[in-house]
Amino acid sequence: MKTVAVIPCYNEEVAIGSVVLKAREQVEKVLVVDDGSTDATAQIARAAGANIISHEKNKGKGAAIKTALEYVAGNGFDTLVLLDGDAQHDPNQIPLLLKAFQRDNADIVIGYRSPEQMPFHRRVGRQVLDYTTGINGAATDSQSGFRALNRRAVDALESKNLRGNGFSIESEMLLAAEELNLNIKEVPVTCSYGNGKTSTKNPISHGFGVLGSIIRLIAEERPLVFVGIPGLVMIFMGFFFGLKLLQLYNDSGYFSIPFTMLAGFFVVIGTLGVFMGLVLNVVSRLVKK
């Protein structure tokens, strides 16, 4: 297979040189997508032997990955490997991902990180984001940036027109892959977190940013799940308070204003939620066509 390793990065001058050199030993070409770095990332990567595509300004990891998908789709590569430029991922493990294409007939291979090797805050954040993404068990490490895609997956995702430009791109890719019936597999890998400060973003703001993006994505892609089902739950809660109201009136003759207000509130809001979910679901399907 003709394989290209793509490293999206922003201000990674400290580690990018060694990552490029190691990756070149495993693949035919290394491409660094420099996402508007203000340091010497691009110059060091080029000196280490990488091809460079530079964004004029920082657009986000998602934008860098979309640039990578467009590049691979137009340059005849069979396989794309994505890894970070901060030396968190070991390029020597690239063959582990590539073997899964033939062994497991995979379209996308995720480098699975065992929770034990991750700092506590990353472990908690990963569990929250994995649960929110809910890829139906197809992936247990939805946030791993160490992943490989075959040509079928590259073409499918490139034509899908992924929308996110931030770190939620990993989740969006998997949600789209599930919709496109792509085969997702995982292989265990090891990651190096050094002193726990490998990321250029604050872990708390990063986590909430990704979570917010995922919630917006699910609301747009699956409005019945995000809006309709909670609305249905609220209707049942309204019926519950309505039954309590009738029971209290039947037993004591007392007409409870609080129960009346609660029942009416939940039924009205729930009905609006179900209606909005149905309408947004129709709109979403029309937009996809």
Image (cartoon, rainbow, N blue to C red):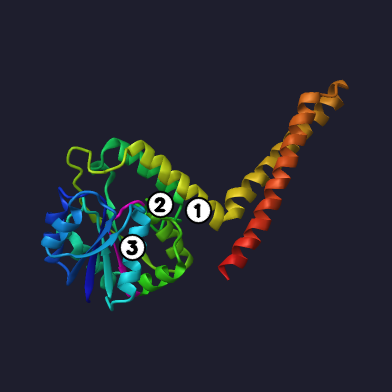
User: Residue at the spot x=24%, y=49% of the render?
Assistant: 38
User: The residue tagged with tag 1: helix, strand or loop?
Assistant: helix
Which disc number belongs to residue 217?
1
- Whether residue 146 is visible here, answered yes or no, is no
| Region of the chain picked out in magenta, as a range | 143-151
Q: Nearer the viewer, residue 188 or 279?
A: 279
In the rendered image, residue 268, in percent from the top left (x then y), is placed at: 75, 41
The residue tagged 3 is 185
Q: Residue furthest front?
A: 56
User: Which residue type carries mark 3?
Assistant: Lys
In the rendered image, residue 235, in percent from the top left (x then y), is placed at: 71, 42
- Asked if residue 45 is among those painted magenta in the image, a careful observer would answer no
Badge 3 crowding class, 10 Å Cα cut-off, few under 14, some 14 to 19, many 20 or more, is many
Q: Earlier in the sequence, mark 3 or mark 1?
A: 3
User: Residue at the spot x=17%, y=55% of the render?
Assistant: 90
Give the left or right position of residue 121, taking residue 171 as reference: left
